[in-house]
Image (spheres, rainbow, N blue to C red):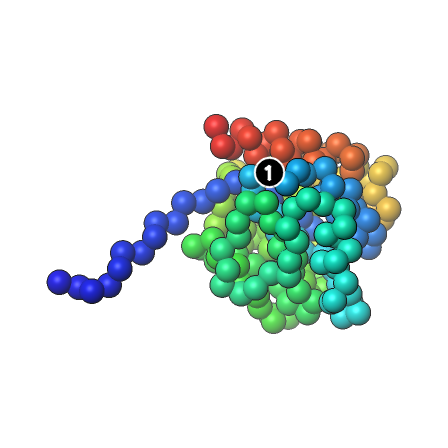
Amino acid sequence: MSSEQPRETYVPRATVVVASSAGGIEGLQVLLSGLGADFPAAVLVAQHLRRARETHIVAILSRHTALAVKLAEDGERPGPGTVYIAPPDHHLCVREDGTLQLTREPPVNRSRPAADPLFRTAAEAFGPLLIACVLTGADGDGARGVEVVKSGGGTVIVEDPASAKFHGMPKAAIETGRVDYVLHAEDIPARIQLLVRRHQG
């Protein structure tokens, strides 16, 4: 008889991925402040970071949310009620078994971390259970990822350019024609919570 323990079966769960760039710290504060401590999903964030932000983003966001906030670690499995931030100079991705992966692959859209690798790999892992959100930003990062999320059956929310501090990322996402909701920043948390509840049945 084999002495190996049976592997735990991986069951995908509703998961939220968020992309933000210029103005994104403020945008993330608004988003996360609207999610209560009992929020039943993990939140994975690709915020374009300078190295100088490395020791500050977790502390800054923690002051505005009841959720736990941490820098993502390679190999960990995201859990509900926790926000996982892509560390500076690393892409945050998701493996097929739902665990997190940090990579030093080349920059995407001149950024590392970038939204597109996170959205693409999360779509492959979570399929229709994925909720992707594009916030303020000055470039087009996230647009290709939005298309992959929709192709996998996921839901896409984009911050209304009228409320975004920088319009580039929201506009690029909207121009794909694959966006489900365009909402002002303060209305996004309630929509996310509604979608997560629907996925939980």
Residue 42 vertical placement versus 112 (above, below) = above
Of 131 and 99, nearer the camera is 99
Residue in view at x 49 percent, y 55 percent: 77
Give the residue type at disc 1.
Answer: Asp
For mark 1, give the secondary structure. Answer: loop
Horizontally, is 23 left or right of 9 in the view? right
Horizontally, is 63 left or right of 98 in the view? right
Residue count near mark 1 (Cα–Cα under 10 Å), binned few <14, some 14–19, many ≥20: few
Image label count: 1
Instruction: State the image coordinates of residue 135 (x, y, percent, origin top left).
Output: 75, 45
Instruction: State the image coordinates of residue 16 (x, y, percent, origin top left).
Output: 60, 44
Residue 97 vertical placement versus 103 (above, below) = above
Residue in view at x 53 percent, y 49 percent: 79
Res. 196 in view: yes
Of 22 and 80, nearer the camera is 80
Q: Which residue is mark 1?
A: 38
Residue in view at x 41 percent, y 45 percent: 11
Instruction: State the image coordinates of residue 145 (x, y, percent, origin top left).
Output: 62, 50
Res. 20 in view: no
